[in-house]
Image (cartoon, rainbow, N blue to C red):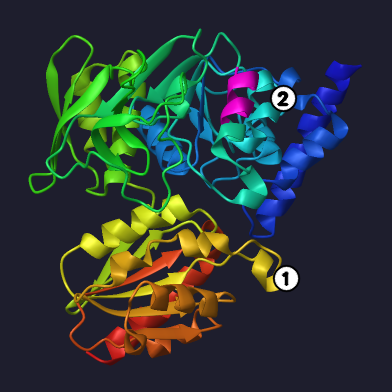
Amino acid sequence: MSKLRYHIAVMAAKFSKVIIRLSGRNGTHTPGVVARKICPDFMAQAPKAPLCICVTGTNGKTTVSNMLTDMLEKEGKKVVSNRTGSNIVPGCVTNLLNSVNWLGRCRVDATVFEVDERASRLILPYVKPDYLVVTNLFRDSLKRNAHPDYIFSVIDTYCPDTTKLILNADEQCSSNLKPNSEHVYFGIGKQDDDKTEPYNLIADYTLCPKCGTKLKFNYLRYHHIGNAYCPNCDYKSADADYLATKVDKEGKKLIVREKDGNEIEYALIHDALFNIYNELTVITMMRELGYSSDEVKKRIAEIHVPESRYSETKVGNVTVVQALSKGQSAVSSCRTFEYVAEEPGKKVIMIAEDDFSDRQKSIEFIGWIYDLEYEQFARDDVMQVVCCGPRCLDHRVRALIAGIPEEKIAWDLDEVAAVDKVKLEGVDKVYILYDCDTYGISCKMKQKLLKRLEDEK
């Protein structure tokens, strides 16, 4: 009976996707709902591809899963993945649906699943991935994810013991997942601008997980990312199997020391530190799949960070940059804030991070706004900060607390209308920082800004 339900579910869900696509939408969520309604154990019933990779973590999972898919496709593999970030249960069921034909048989070489970390308990036991890539675990939306320790316990409990884990050796939380499973670690070696003491507003893992003693850092990159050890017991950061020994941002090169001790030079895809970690994650995964360093070098040079995460357009002397800066996730935003602040040139920064729930009912916890490091923008080369959206006045207050002069702060409840308040004179770059849910709005902001720049040329 369950097999019959499975086949009916495949037919019905695929038909629903055809209808949805004809209406001009992507069909990444609803077909999964249809499939589960007819066959509740669809994920367990569906045949799996010869290679199954799941990617989860607080930040970077969309970028990593997209780049992994690109790499595998360029190697001639037939791959399906939930590229658009539909990463909870219906989206992952839709991904499985896309991997089978109308008869319910697997038709691909590999499936790559981006998996929401909180929803992983409902996905990992049924997908049973060959590899689980965990980019990092940071403090996220308190309403959704509580504390990263809770998310750690979810993944640690529900990830199958047979799954091989690809983990960040520099991240003090996720690097401790599944201690009895097989692990491969990646990390970045000491850099000239590293610190030795936590300096961010958020640093959740500063105590030894074994004895509770305050950790010491051989080097600290940001928040709790770095190489740590306990002065009181034998706890220390894991040794990286793939260690980036040199990051040459000017020459756009990444030197990685691999398991055998050889150092391989790869093209540097993007110079933001969080994207360097993302690239290193992909290199590690591809090398573990058995691809040679020459093959990986070739493919790395051919891919890029997804445009939904970062894009640049230049009109005249002004560059307009869209960059993801996840709302309600202070750590993600702080990483983007620091990267943007340290970029050369005079800049205007537009903050459009409020999600759609605030447009329906303002019940979201706003404390995350006060965890944002607006202090990064209290500098001479930041000409203006434009706060946009339903919470713009909260952002304005936080910017004032950070010491940004009042005359440099503009605000508007409407993100697109806020473009009219941007002061373009003498500006080299305008950054539009947006949440996952406001990407569409950010595109409208960008188009209006580009038109304004064209008109004022």
Relative side of 167 to 279, left or right: right
Relative to 98, is 395 above or below?
below
Could you say which quadrant of the image residue 346 lies in? bottom left
The percent position of residue 402, horizontal first and vertical second, equals: 36, 71
Relative to 53, is 357 above or below?
below
Quadrant, the C terminus: bottom left
Mark toward the viewer: 2 or 1: 1
Judge whether residue 160 can be spotted in this image.
yes
Relative side of 233 to 211, left or right: left
Q: Which mark is residue 360?
A: 1
Specify the farthest residue to the right.
1
Judge whether residue 446 can be spotted in this image.
no
Q: Residue at x 64, y 60 (%)?
A: 24
Considering the numbered disc 2 on the image, is that residue within a helix, a strand or a loop? helix
Q: Residue at x 63, y 43 (%)?
A: 146
The percent position of residue 315, horizontal first and vertical second, equals: 24, 77
Q: Is residue 346 magenta?
A: no
Quadrant, the N terminus: top right
Identified by mark 1, the residue type is Gln
**Label 1 CA crowd tier, 10 Å (few <14, some 14–19, many 20+):** few
Q: Residue at x 46, y 39 (%)?
A: 61
The percent position of residue 185, horizontal first and vertical second, equals: 34, 20
- Which residue bears the numbered disc 2? 43
* Numbered range of the magenta stretch: 152-159
Identified by mark 2, the residue type is Met
Q: CA distance from mark 2 to mark 1?
A: 33 Å
Relative side of 127 to 370, left or right: right
Could you say which quadrant of the image residue 113 lies in? top right
Q: Nearer the viewer, residue 40 or 437?
A: 437
- Determine the main secondary structure of the stretch shown in magenta: helix
Q: Is residue 156 magenta?
A: yes
